[in-house]
Image (cartoon, helix red, strand yellow):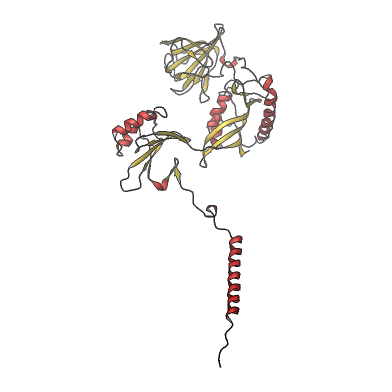
Amino acid sequence: MKKKHLPEWVLGILFFLLLAFTVSRLMYYNYMIPEPTVADIDIPEPELLYGFPVDSFHVEENTIDRNQSLSDILLARGVSALSIDKIARNSVAVFDTRKMREGNNFALFYSKDSTRTPLYFVYQQDAISYYAFELSSDSLLVKAGHYEVESKRKTATGIIRSSLWNTMKDNDMDPMLAIQLSDIYAWSIDFFGIQKGDYFTVIYDENFVKGESIGTGKIYAALFNSGGQDFYAIYFEQEDGQSYFDDKGQSLRKSFLKSPLKFSARISSRFSNSRMHPVLRIRRPHHGVDYAAPTGTPVYSIGDGVITTKAYQAGGGGNYLKIRHNSVYTTSYMHLSKFASGISSGTRVKQGQLIGYVGSTGLSSGPHLDFRVFMNGIPIDPLKMKSPPAEPVSSANFERFNKIREQLLKELQSGAKSKDTTKTATSI
């Protein structure tokens, strides 16, 4: 029996319908499912070191050795003396290569081929800054770079058990906070006289680079309770600069520092009209304050002034300095191991300027600083000297200061409520 076939026109219609259905479905899927974009493709971020993609180079990381120079490093790695000389000259305006410090990190980036040609040298100055030196181009340029710093605002509270420094260390706070606080309160708190039970609250920035803490940044405010008295410090900027003020808007900066040393020393002898001399074993006046500290401890001028005497007194003060601050006050600093660079009679010094180092020269039983203050030529007790304040917050800025102060005082008082614990540290 002969098979029957569909007419050609019917087959044509069926083929057309099938083709139309297929095209419509393709158009539907193309509309509903867009083409993948670059954003849809998971491309891993390249690993960077000092801004260079690590996988594009052979990389050597190392540290600066004692007395090692740029020339020592590069000559040993095949860079010519002529190129090194040009690099050193090119870098003068950016970075003095003679100031590279022992222990600091450096990296060399070599070509990835078999020649391993040194292409870049990078020296890391500190946790943030680094300097990149071209080694292979004709220009041999030197560029400064830095890591991005992320700051997190925090609050910390602590109770003094022995010293401010030990409180920081014992409670996993950055000890640099102790130095910053001692600088802020240098005119109002005697850190040699702080006692067990004194406490503090501080609002500050902690800085991070690549997720790693690199230390503390700005202190915004602090409350330090010493001897039952509250001392506030509020950071504020006005036309004449930035400074710290108390809760009344008075500047914490006074005409004189409370001490010529940082807080890492102790008072070994106080002002007295009759003291047993530790060497002569006789009683005689001691019109000063002795600060026991290791030889070489820095000594600072407590105020602006002019050095009137730089001398050595064999049977008494050893190496000593006298500074005239104004028509009323003069200070002296005795038993110094040596004087600071640039210090001589007639030199003008600023408050907080380094003037010498603790020693045991002259008639001394051990390393210490004998510090004295004279008012109109008469010795007075340095620990009882009152110093006039610097300029307060101006009336034009007081409304703005008041708003900042109110917010910071709330934060400080909230932190102070936790003083029954040894430490709290929280992000704000």
Q: Residue furthest bottom?
A: 1
Q: Is residue 144 above or below residue 254?
A: below
Residue 357 in picture, x, y percent from top left: 45, 20
Q: Is residue 282 visible?
A: no
Q: Is residue 417 above or below residue 355?
A: below
Residue 70 in picture, x, y percent from top left: 34, 33
Residue 153 in picture, x, y percent from top left: 60, 36
Q: Residue at x 59, y 64 (%)?
A: 27
Residue 189 in picture, x, y percent from top left: 59, 22
User: 182 and 427: which one is in front?
Assistant: 427
Looking at the rendered image, the quarter that the N terminus falls into is bottom right
| Residue 270 lies in quadrant | top right
| Residue 14 lies in quadrant | bottom right
Left or right, residue 373 beside residue 132: right
| Residue 398 lies in quadrant | top right
The number of numbered discs placed on residues in the rendered structure image is: 0
Q: Residue at x 54, y 19 (%)?
A: 259
Q: Is residue 154 above or below residue 305?
A: below
Q: Is residue 158 above or below residue 273?
A: below
Q: Is residue 22 visible?
A: yes
Looking at the rendered image, the quarter that the C terminus falls into is top right
User: 114 and 158: which one is in front?
Assistant: 114
Q: Residue at x 45, y 13 (%)?
A: 320
Left or right, residue 283 beside residue 29: left
